[in-house]
Image (spheres, rainbow, N blue to C red):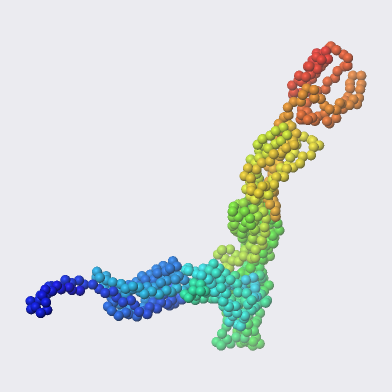
């Protein structure tokens, strides 16, 4: 752009014009025309844009692919002859905006300009599910089950289809949420071949940009009414055509098949049988847990002539499910679950135990243990390291084959529940005592508890008195410093207190008891005028002796049990002389005896 200054008029011959003052500037380029954005291929993580070149001078284009849902972005510079581009390496299932800028000028040009972007939105196809496996669960004649691994990328749901290629009842699309990784198609036709397909979807039902991946598909036959290969149920993983096979009879002359099931681990064999034009067969009556080779021979000829021939066998190896063990008993300690069982029939190599707490989940943990039993001799096991006072569910699985063996399997579980014992309360002690009470205290044990119980007994005494045990229910909120004040006791008497605790129903268990021995305080001595309430009864007299009998009451008094007693013999109406007095062994003389002797006019003489 140039600007000139002029002096003079157009009619003036001396009109003059200055040199121009000039500056160069570029006009913004036009935006691209007719941008269209598509998801070109289900198998690649990409979106594609196409457009028409606009009028005007263009040196190139700049492409941006930006995700509004957290996917990885993409940028690219293109030359001016390009009118389409595919953004690759994007995040599966994510929503993207593809923007195309027209560029005029070069990177070395100060006046390089870009147009406003023209944009289009598109979602990338989601990835296909990973590791799809299809099997017939539990010998079912009406269902097949699929499991898979969630793929990388953004997924909103799955769609499941089960379509039969042999005329069975189909099961069309069923929608599942994105957190589901297994599904069972039910209501199928027994013996028919089905293709089970799993589609991943990204986007919602109301979303115009909702996309579905290519299906991940597997073919599986539903068991016939007679059951599948093996004793217990069909195999839990993809087994190709075994025990089904396909033969193209247009390429060779086949009159029948012969099937054999032989065991390499000592199981019962299945003798061969000729079949006419059948493409499937069930070997039955096999030995649980054993490894078998199933061989299929094709036969040409009738058997009535010398031209009958048999092919080499097509063989596959498979293990029959082991029988489950039968649980006999369960028992617990404060930290273990002890289970006993009978050895299952057939072949087995060990056991797997899985355990899970039913209550007290904030403290107790789940887990699993395995034991090897190649000799098939083990019938009990203790699961250790459990939490006290907790109800557990334990599953016992029988295993046939170990890691690294051909086709290891485990049988159906036997499930048992039981509660571990609460811990024994710690630091059982007497916190305080009086003449007639003992305050017992202890530390709260681990585990869920319902109550405590304290049994009270005399120590080294034979008493007719019956003592009531103390039952201590827990308050609404467990007391961290439990205690019980036991009252109504006799003074200066030694008691044994035995403490136990109980877990709640159902499956109530009791902890191991703990005990303590303690005496109540001694009562103050009785006044000097207190005497036994019942006089002794004279039962025999001689010239030199008097035999008397005391009643039981003489040994018990309101001031506490009698520790010792004295028998005083006096002559009536006699004064003066000595009175011989012998205290009980190990006790101090009674000072009241001297007072009494003086009152009788006699002198107390100790023996």
**Residue at the image position 63 percent from the left and 62 percent from the top:** 397
Q: Residue at x 32, y 75 (%)?
A: 102
| Screen quadrant of the N terminus | bottom left
Residue 234 showing in the rendered view: yes
Percent from the top left, x then y, of residue 540? 91, 25
Residue placed furthest toward the top: 576
**Is residue 79 or residue 418 the one in the foreground?**
79
Residue 247 position within the rendered picture, expressed as x and y whole percent measured from the top left: 57, 83
User: Hey, which quadrant is residue 468 in on the image?
Assistant: top right
Count of number-bearing discs: 0
Foreground pick, 47 / 277: 47
**On the rendered structure, is 73 left or right of 497?**
left
**Viewer-closest of 305 and 261:** 261
Residue 268 appears left or right of 128: right
In the rendered image, the quadrant that contains the C terminus is top right
Which image quadrant is residue 226 in? bottom right
- In this view, which residue lies farthest toward the left? 14
Name the residue at 65% across, 63% down: 413
Q: In this view, does 501 lie above or below 230?
A: above
Residue 550 falls in image quadrant:
top right
Residue 392 on image: x %, y %: 64, 56
Q: In this view, does 230 lie to the left or right of 466?
A: left
Is any atom of residue 281 visible in this view?
no
Q: Which of the pair 554/307 is nearer the observer?
A: 554
Which residue corresponds to the image point at 40% horizontal and 78% vertical from the top-left? Answer: 36
On the image, the x and y values in percent for residue 40 come to 43, 77
> Is 445 drawn above or below residue 125 in the view shown?
above
């Amino acid at each position: 752009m140039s600007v000139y200054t002029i002096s003079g008029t157009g009619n003036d011959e001396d009109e003059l014009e200055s040199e121009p003052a000039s500056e160069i500037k570029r006009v913004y380029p036009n935006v691209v025309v007719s941008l269209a954005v598509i998801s070109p291929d289900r198998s690649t993580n990409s979106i594609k844009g196409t457009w028409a070149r606009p009028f005007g001078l263009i040196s190139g284009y700049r492409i941006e692919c930006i995700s509004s849902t957290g996917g990885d972005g993409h940028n690219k510079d293109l030359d001016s002859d390009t009118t389409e581009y595919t953004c690759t390496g994007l995040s599966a299932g994510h929503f993207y905006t593809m923007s195309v800028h027209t560029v005029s000028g070069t990177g070395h040009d100060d006046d390089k300009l870009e147009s406003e972007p023209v944009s289009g939105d598109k979602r990338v196809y989601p990835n296909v599910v990973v590791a799809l496996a299809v099997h017939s669960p539990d010998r079912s004649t009406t269902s097949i089950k699929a499991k898979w691994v969630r793929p990388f990328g953004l997924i909103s749901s799955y769609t499941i289809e089960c379509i039969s290629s042999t005329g069975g009842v189909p099961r069309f699309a069923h929608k599942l949420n994105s957190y589901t990784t297994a599904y069972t198609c039910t209501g199928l036709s027994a013996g028919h071949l089905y293709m089970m397909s799993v589609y991943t979807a990204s986007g919602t039902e109301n979303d115009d940009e909702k996309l579905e991946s290519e299906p991940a598909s597997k073919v599986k036959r539903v068991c016939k009414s007679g059951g599948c290969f093996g004793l217990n149920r069909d195999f839990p993983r993809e087994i190709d055509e075994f025990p089904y096979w396909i033969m193209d009879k247009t390429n060779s002359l086949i009159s029948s098949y012969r099937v054999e099931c032989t065991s390499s681990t000592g199981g019962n064999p299945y003798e061969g049988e000729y079949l006419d034009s059948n493409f499937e067969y069930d070997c039955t009556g096999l030995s649980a847990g054993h490894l078998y080779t199933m061989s299929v021979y094709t036969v040409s000829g009738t058997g009535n002539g010398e031209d009958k021939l048999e092919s080499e066998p097509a063989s596959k190896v498979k293990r029959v499910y082991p029988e489950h063990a039968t649980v006999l008993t369960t028992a617990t300690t404060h930290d273990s679950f002890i289970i006993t069982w009978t050895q299952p029939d057939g072949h087995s190599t060990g056991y797997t135990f899985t355990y899970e707490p039913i209550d007290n989940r904030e403290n107790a943990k789940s887990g699993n243990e395995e034991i090897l039993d190649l000799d098939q001799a083990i019938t009990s096991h203790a699961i250790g390291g459990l939490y006290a006072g907790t109800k557990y569910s334990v599953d016992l699985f029988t295993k046939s084959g170990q890691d690294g063996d051909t086709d290891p399997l485990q049988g159906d579980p036997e499930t048992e529940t039981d509660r571990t014992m609460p811990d024994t309360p710690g630091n059982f002690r007497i916190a305080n005592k009086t003449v007639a009470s003992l305050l017992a205290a202890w530390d709260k044990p681990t585990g869920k508890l319902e109550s405590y119980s304290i049994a009270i007994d005399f120590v080294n005494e034979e008493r007719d008195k019956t003592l009531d045990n103390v039952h201590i229910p827990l308050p609404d909120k467990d007391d961290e410093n439990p205690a019980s004040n036991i009252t109504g006791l006799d003074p200066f008497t030694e008691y044994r207190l035995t403490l136990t605790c109980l877990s709640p129903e159902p499956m109530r268990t009791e902890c191991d008891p703990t005990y303590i021995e303690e005496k109540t305080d001694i009562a103050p001595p009785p006044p000097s005028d207190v005497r036994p309430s019942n006089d002794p009864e004279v039962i025999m007299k001689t010239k030199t002796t008097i035999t008397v009998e005391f009643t039981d009451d003489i040994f018990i008094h309101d001031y506490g049990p009698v520790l010792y007693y004295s028998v005083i013999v006096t002559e009536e109406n006699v004064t003066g002389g000595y009175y011989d007095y012998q205290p009980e062994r190990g006790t101090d003389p009674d000072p009241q005896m001297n007072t009494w002797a003086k009152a009788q006019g006699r002198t107390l003489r100790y023996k």
